[in-house]
Image (spheres, helix red, strand yellow):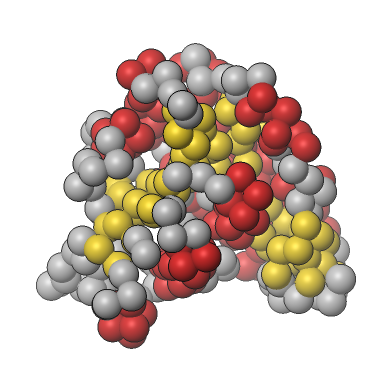
C-alpha cells in the first residue's frame, strides 16, 4: 500500500533569497541524495515534489509587481517565468543525477487564476507521471488571471489544489528554518520553536508569526501556515510537517518516518 507524500524544497533553502539568482547547489544536491535514499528505504512512497522560486522568480516578480497584475510592462511576466524555469532546470538536473525520476511540470502552462486565487490546473500530466512510477516536479510560477491579467502562484497554492484531488497522507515543507517559531529566528534574538499547531493554539500562533526574511512576494510563513492549516481542516487525516532542510538527514528522516519529531507538525 502506497503512502502519497508532497515535498516542497523552499526557495529560502535552495537559494540565497537576498541575492539575485543565487542558487545553493550543494543544498539542492544533498536534498536530491536524501530523497533518493528515502525512496530506496521506503519503496511504498509515492512522491510529488515542488520547489519555491527563491531569488530567481521573486526578485523579478517584486520588481514588476507581477502579483498585483495589470502590468505596465508585460516583459516582467516573461522575465519572472523565465527565471523560475532557470531554477527549475537546476533542481531537475540535480534530481535526475541523484536517480530521482522527476518530470518537470510547468504550472503556468495550464493554471487559471481569479484575483490571485488558483482555480484550475491540469491534473492529467501529474496523474500520468504517478501512474508510471515517476515523480512530478512543480514550482512557484507566473500565471494568467481573469481579474488581474496575471499573478504569481506559490508552490503552496499548487500543492493545495493538487491535494484536493490527490489526497496525500502528508505534506512536508523543507525550508531554511526548523519549523514555525514565535518570531523570526533570523532576526529576533529570543524565539522558540512551536512543536505543533492545532485548533488549540492556531489563533495564538497566527498572531505571533512574523514574515520570512528577504524578498518574498508569496506572503512568507504566515500565508504558508494559514493555507496549510485550512487544508488540514478540510482533510483531517492529513499531516503537514514544516522542517529545516539545512539539517543533514532531516528530509530523509521526515520522508521515512511521519513521527520523526522534526520541525513543526500541523494537524487536525
Quarter of the image for residue 122 reads top right
Residue found at the very far front of the displayed protein: 1
Residue closest to the eye, 62 or 202: 202
The number of numbered discs placed on residues in the rendered structure image is 0
In this picture, residue 191 sits left or right of residue 17: left
In this picture, residue 263 sits left or right of residue 65: left
Picture layout, residue 251 above or below residue 93: below
Quarter of the image for residue 214 reads bottom left
Q: Where is residue 135 in the image (x, y as percent from the top left)?
A: 58, 28
Question: The C terminus lies in which quarter of the figure?
Answer: bottom left
Residue that appears at 78% across and 57% down: 120
Q: Where is residue 261 in the image (x, y as percent from the top left)?
A: 20, 47
Asked whether residue 142 is in view, the answer is yes
Quarter of the image for residue 179 reads bottom left
Q: Position of residue 38 (x, y in %)?
A: 36, 24
In this picture, residue 60 sits left or right of residue 95: right
Q: Where is residue 65 in the image (x, y as percent from the top left)?
A: 69, 72
Residue that appears at 27% across and 57% down: 264
Residue found at the very far left of the displayed protein: 190
Residue that appears at 46% across and 67% down: 233
Asked whether residue 79 is in view, the answer is no
Residue closest to the eye, 168 or 15: 168
Residue that appears at 49% across and 37% down: 4
Amino acid at each position: 500500500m502506497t503512502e502519497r507524500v508532497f515535498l516542497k524544497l523552499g526557495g529560502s533553502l535552495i537559494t540565497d533569497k537576498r541575492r539575485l539568482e543565487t542558487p545553493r547547489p550543494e543544498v539542492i544536491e544533498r536534498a536530491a541524495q536524501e530523497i533518493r535514499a528515502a525512496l530506496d528505504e521506503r519503496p511504498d512512497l509515492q512522491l510529488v515534489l515542488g520547489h519555491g522560486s527563491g531569488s530567481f522568480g521573486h526578485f523579478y516578480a517584486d520588481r514588476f509587481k507581477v502579483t498585483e497584475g495589470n502590468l505596465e510592462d508585460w516583459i516582467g511576466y516573461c522575465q519572472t517565468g523565465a527565471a523560475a524555469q532557470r531554477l527549475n532546470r537546476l533542481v531537475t538536473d540535480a534530481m535526475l543525477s541523484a536517480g530521482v525520476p522527476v518530470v518537470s511540470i510547468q504550472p503556468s502552462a495550464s493554471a487559471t487564476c481569479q484575483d490571485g486565487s488558483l482555480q484550475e490546473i491540469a491534473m492529467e500530466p501529474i496523474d500520468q507521471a504517478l501512474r508510471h512510477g515517476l515523480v512530478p516536479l512543480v514550482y512557484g510560477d507566473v500565471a494568467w488571471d481573469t481579474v488581474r491579467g496575471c499573478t504569481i502562484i506559490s508552490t503552496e497554492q499548487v500543492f493545495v489544489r493538487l491535494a484536493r484531488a490527490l489526497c496525500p497522507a502528508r505534506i512536508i515543507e523543507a525550508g531554511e528554518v526548523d519549523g514555525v517559531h514565535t518570531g523570526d529566528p533570523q532576526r529576533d534574538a529570543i524565539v522558540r520553536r512551536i512543536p505543533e499547531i492545532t485548533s488549540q493554539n492556531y489563533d495564538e500562533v497566527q498572531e505571533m508569526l512574523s514574515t520570512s526574511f528577504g524578498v518574498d512576494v508569496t506572503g512568507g510563513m504566515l500565508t504558508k501556515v494559514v493555507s496549510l492549516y485550512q487544508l488540514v481542516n478540510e482533510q483531517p487525516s492529513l499531516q503537514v510537517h514544516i522542517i529545516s532542510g539545512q539539517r543533514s538527514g532531516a528530509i530523509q528522516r521526515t520522508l521515512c518516518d511521519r513521527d520523526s519529531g522534526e520541525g513543526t507538525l500541523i494537524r487536525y
